[in-house]
Structures are given as structure tokens and as C-alpha cells.
Amino acid sequence: MPTTTLAGTRLRQRRLTMGLRQADLATRAGISASYLNLIEHNRRRIGPDVLSRLAAALGLPEAALSEGADNGLMDDLRAAAAVTGEAQAELDRIEDFAGRFPGWAGLLADLHRRTSRLARAVEALNDRMSHDPHLQASLHEMLSAASAVRSTAEILAETEDIPPEWRERFHRNLHQDSERMAVGAEALVAYLDNSGQAQETGIAAPQEELEAWLGARGWHLAEVEAGDAAALDPEIAALASGAARVLAHAWVARAVLDAKALPLEPLQAARVAARDDPATLAAQFGTDLLTVFRRIAMLPAAPEGLVICDGSGTLLFRKPVAGFALPRFGAACPLWPLFTALSRPMVPVSALVETAGAGSLRFAVRAFCQPRYPGGFGGPELREAAMLILPAGTVSTQDAVLLGSTCRVCPRTGCPARREPSIVAEAAG
Amino acid sequence: MAERVLLIEDEPNIAEAIRFILGRNGCEVFVQTDGRDGLAAVARLQPDLVILDLMLPGMGGMEVLQNLRMDPATRNLPVMMLTAKGQGRDREAATRAGVSAFMTKPFANADMVSAVRALLGAS
């Protein structure tokens, strides 16, 4: 059982709480008081035998002294040290620091968590400002109108001898541009306000509206399983945009077909025998892999994330999974196995991946691309690729594919696939 | 003889205001609203200065600039680019492509006149 020097601090706190003197506990545990003193001040690691005796002397389970109650604190302190610029933290003395100054260590860890949250918020806002095409177009329209108004108003205010026909023309232009600004401002406010929803949810596109609706339902449509998809109609009708309603109806129609191909109870029973291998399940149920991916990700309380893209690589659907950031706008990381699958239709792609950043996590992903030919032999080939994402914990000896979310907010340095500089790297530099 | 300024700008009211203020300051101003037509007008009119909006329909301002810089006849022609705030990355690209000056919208008319005078004086 691993023990850290911080066990000394916990040991001291327990002893003091129980009102025991150091010498008394040392005697009970069969060690010298001076050795116990070194342990309690985190100057000596506790071996498993001594830990066992000290725990017994205190009437506590060993876990109370040794288990990683402070692992989160250690992780946060290491993460804080990792993002620090020029100031070098003494990483080899991190446990000593946390043990001697638990209050300061907690404060530092808390500040690091807050800073990380703020950094993520800045990234999200920057991402939105940089990649939201509607916002960009609206702001450009407003700036153009403002520019015309300023120049025209200046001419009228500062030029005494304007010919009457020019004066009339400029007055008309001013009127036009002020109308345009008023309409543009209203549209912009309506867009940002989105009837009171956008400020809270940040929803900007019909696709996001669909995902928000499904997310609010736990990504599962019980009505579809019960054969009553029509019961969802009122909820779909309440979605804010017409485009989102169209997407939602299409999603539900496909979910109905998916549920027929892979009925809930037989599927759940078969997953164990198939060891959750989508290809095995697809063969067993006589369906395709993308249907299996969608069904697995949309089962009740399914932990799997899912992303779907079309042949251009545009993300069509995103069911998030904690720790694996999915971009809202713009293109995703080109290293995603999703895109490997996209370039190799009908070939299953399986990989262990590791996300970027201080809190990097590992995920087991499976990706597959299915081409279709809606126009027959003479028509275009349309591709759809999907990637199932399953958390794989943080510890693994297997090599992982190092990837990110999207270049703009990815801190990974030296990435051969980078498209543009990262604001995160810039900020750190 | 008045200096010839070609303004390539798709916003008619901005174009009208610039045409007026530069016209009052001794320039002969020609206006085009599309990048491709603007490029053709450069060859036809041989202006002393081009004022080029960044965001244009059809061929964008950046592409027009690159075409001008690739042509030996217009390689050194002064080009002022009109940009909006928040187009920092586009400005960097335009600088690399050889733009002579920038004017950020919305601008003060006096600044526009000064910048045009400076470019014409330097050419």
C-alpha cells in the first residue's frame, strides 16, 4: 500500500485529536519517540509495518493514515507548478510543503483551480468571438454602418459649402445607415439574448440546440424505446429555432430505426458476451457499426461520448464526455481517430488517446466511417464517420495518441498537426 | 493634374463619403464595388493610389492585394487597406503581402485625408 510523507501530518492530527502524547503513541507502536517525531513532521516515510502498528495503536484502519485523501491536493499542486512560467517550484518537496503548510497548500491549489476555470472561460469566449460566423457578420455590419455614419456626419458638420444635391444625398445616407444600425443592433441583441436562453446556455447554433435538448434528457429518449416517438413532438415544437426542430425530428426518426435494429434489452444482454465490441454487436444484430455507436452512446446513463462528422470533417453531433473537450466552432484536432477513420472508410479504428493540458486524461476511442451512395453508382459518395469515446483512467502503460480539442485552445507544444498558434500557449509564454 | 484614387469598397455610403472628402482635397476618385472589377479597373485607370476594403464580395481585398503585388506594373503602387477592429490577423497577413497603409473603420475624415496625402506624397 503506498504511503506518502503526508501520512505523517494525518498521523499527528489523529494523535492530537485523541489527546495522546507522542511518547505514549510511540511506546504503543513499539518505535522510538524521536522516530515518531520525524514521521509526524514528514521527515521520514512510514513503512508498511510501522504504519500498521501505528494504526493499530490509534485504533484506526490503516487506510485512514495512508490512503490518498490528499491525492487531489497533490495533483492540484503539481498542476499549478506545471503551468507556472519562469518561477520554478520545488516539485521534489511538494509533499513536504503540503504537509508543513496544509492551509497555504490548500489555498494555492484552490487558486490554481479558480485560475484554470477562468482560463477555460476566456478560451470559450475567445473561441466564440473568433469562430462564431453569425457574430462576426453582425459586428462587421454594425461597424460598416458606424463607419459610414461617422464620415457622413463629419462632412455635414464640418463642411460649410456642401452643394445642395450632396447635402441631400448625405442626409439620405445618414437616415439609411441609422436605420441599418438600429436593425443590426436589435438583431445582435436578440442573437445574444436568444429570448433569455443564450446568456445562460451560450447556445449559438441549431445543432447546439439539439444537443442541449438531448443533454437535458440525459441523452436518452425513453419514448422511442417505448415505441411512442410522437410523444416527443411537443418538446421538439418548443425548441427555439426551426432548424433545430428539423434536426431534432431527423434525430428521433433515426433513433427509432436504431432502436428497431438494436432493441434495448437484447442489446444490453449481448454487450457483455460481445465484450462491448461494436463490430461483434453489429454482426450479431445484422446492422452497421454507426448504428451500434449511436445506440451505445444513447443508452440510459451511458458514459460514452460520441462525435459524428460528415465527409468534410464538420462535426454534426457531439455528446460530450468529461475531460475530452469538443470544439464548439471551427475544426477539431486533426489527430482525432475520427479523421483517421474518415480517410479510411469501412476500416475500424481503435486507439488509446491522451488529451492535452495539465489535467490530461486517457480515453479509449473507436471510430468508423461509413460511405453511402444516395444517387447510386452515378451519384456522389457521401461519408459519415463517428467516434465513441470512453474514459480509460489516467494510468496505463500503453502508448497513447496525444491529441487536443482544437488548435486555437490546445496548449500542446511541438505538435506536428498544429494549424494555428494557440491562445493558451501564447498566454503561458 | 489631380491624383487618381481608385476606391474598391462595397459599402456605397462609405464610398460616397470617401469620394466626397477626397474629391474636395483635389483627388479624382473612381469607385468599384467588387474585387475582380477593381483589379480590372487598376489596369484600365492606372491610379496613383488604391484604397481597398478587406471584405469584398467575389474576390476579397487580400486577393486583390496579392494580385497587385505579383504584377510588375503595380508592384509598387500604394495600397491603403480599410479594415475593421478585430481583424488583427488579417492585418498581419496584409502587411506580409505588402500593403502600404491601413485605415481602421470607423475613421476620422481628417485622418483619411492625411493618410492619402502621405501615400501620394511618398509615391
Image (cartoon, coloured by chain):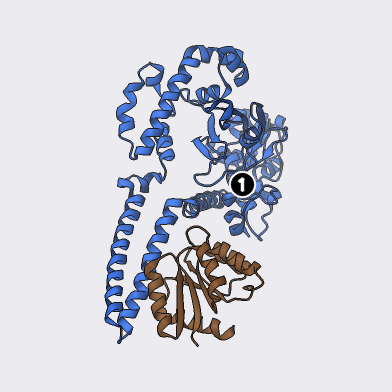
Q: In the rendered image, what is the letter of the chain coloured brown? A: B
Q: How many marks?
A: 1
Residue shown at the point (32%, 22%) measured from the top left: A231
**Res. A225 image quadrant:** top left
Who is closer to the viewer here, B93 or A7? B93
Kind of residue at badge 1:
Gly
Q: In the rendered image, what is the letter of the chain coloured blue? A: A
Visible residue check, residue A335: yes
- Residue A84 to residue A220: above or below: below
> Residue A325: percent from the left, percent from the top?
54, 41
Q: Which residue is mark 1?
A: A357
**Res. A288 image quadrant:** top right
Please give left or right for residue B44 compared with residue A24 in the image: left
Residue shown at the point (46%, 18%) measured from the top left: A259
Who is closer to the viewer here, A124 or A99? A124
Q: Quadrant of the C terminus of chain A?
A: bottom right
Residue shown at the point (57%, 36%) measured from the top left: A311
> Residue A102: percent from the left, percent from the top?
57, 48
Visible residue check, residue A277: no
Q: Quadrant of the N terminus of chain A?
A: top right
Who is closer to the viewer here, B25 or A5? B25
> Residue A12: percent from the left, percent from the top?
60, 41
- Residue A141 to residue A173: above or below: above
Tag 1 secondary structure: loop
Q: Residues within 10 Å of mark 1 (few under 14, many from 20)?
A: some
Who is closer to the viewer here, A358 or A181? A181
Residue shown at the point (63%, 47%) measured from the top left: A78
> Residue A284: percent from the left, percent from the top?
59, 12
- Residue A178 to residue B76: above or below: above
